[in-house]
């Protein structure tokens, strides 16, 4: 191991630049370069470090929060999730949203959805509005889910629960993003709604996203 020469099953300091190794598989660094108000833990596979970098200094330049996010998605269970199901008009929709607390005072969100309305059109690509709504009630047509969740009064798209739209490709969508508008405890018991149309991020109160076609309660 080129850059972390000391390794054991216990975490221990092996470099004056604060690069550490856990067992013989993962290396993690405390990176002081980013403007966050606390220490961040970054995990890097040793074989990637060895292949891409000629020195620890070069490796450190590639460490960003995204490095940690990728590791979280691959290795950690979510802190909250929502099973998504289509309403009466779109029963083929199914999916899962996962929410992960991060060390950056924000939430990592991953959403995967199958059976969106463009599934029967080869090569099709469509956007679908997606938001967290204030009530955890998913009974089609999902009007009981209420308005967009917001911890303080705000206009759209500045609600706490306003999110990027899903990009559906022939009925399938996957996305992941980092969001500091809400915390995990705030959204437990609320709902994630997918809409039939794109969010235009202008029209009040909900971006003219159209019919609520799928819903999942966040637990």
Image: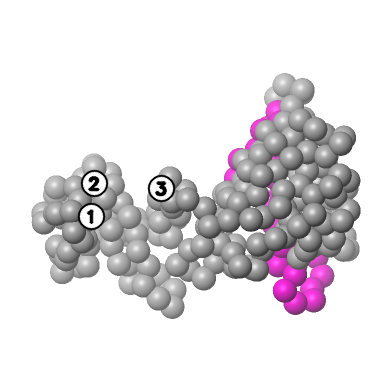
Residue position for label 2? 25
Q: Nearer the viewer, residue 102 or 122?
A: 102
Would you identify the image quadrant in which residue 205 lies?
Answer: bottom right
Question: Is 127 situated above or below 155?
Answer: above
> Residue extending furthest left?
5
Q: Quadrant of the C terminus?
A: bottom right
Q: Secondary structure at mark 3?
A: helix
Q: Secondary structure at mark 2?
A: loop
Residue position for label 1? 22
Can residue 211 be seen here?
Answer: no
Residue position for label 3? 75
Q: Residue at x 70, y 43 (%)?
A: 84
Q: Residue at x 79, y 49 (%)?
A: 138
Left or right of 120, for residue 61? left
Sequence-wise first label, 1 or 3: 1
Residue interval drawn in magenta: 150-175
């Amino acid at each position: 191991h080129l850059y972390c020469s000391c390794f054991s099953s216990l975490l221990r300091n092996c470099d004056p630049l604060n690069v550490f190794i856990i067992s013989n598989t993962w290396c993690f660094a405390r990176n002081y370069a980013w403007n966050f108000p606390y220490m961040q833990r970054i995990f890097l596979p040793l074989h990637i470090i060895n292949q891409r970098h000629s020195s620890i200094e070069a490796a450190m330049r590639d460490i960003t929060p995204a490095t940690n996010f990728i590791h979280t998605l691959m290795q950690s269970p979510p802190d909250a999730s929502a099973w998504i199901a289509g309403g009466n008009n779109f029963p083929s929709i199914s999916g899962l949203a996962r929410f992960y607390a991060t060390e950056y005072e924000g939430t990592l969100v991953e959403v995967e959805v199958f059976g969106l309305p463009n599934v029967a059109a080869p090569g099709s690509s469509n956007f679908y509005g997606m938001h967290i709504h204030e009530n955890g009630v998913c009974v089609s047509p999902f009007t009981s889910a209420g308005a967009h969740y917001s911890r303080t009064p705000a206009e759209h798209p500045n609600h706490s629960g306003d999110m990027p739209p899903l990009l559906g490709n022939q009925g399938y969508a996957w996305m992941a993003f980092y969001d500091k508008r809400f915390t995990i405890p705030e959204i437990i018991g609320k709902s994630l709604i997918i809409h039939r149309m794109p969010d235009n991020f202008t029209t009040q109160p909900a971006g003219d996203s159209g019919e609520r076609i799928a819903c999942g309660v966040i637990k």
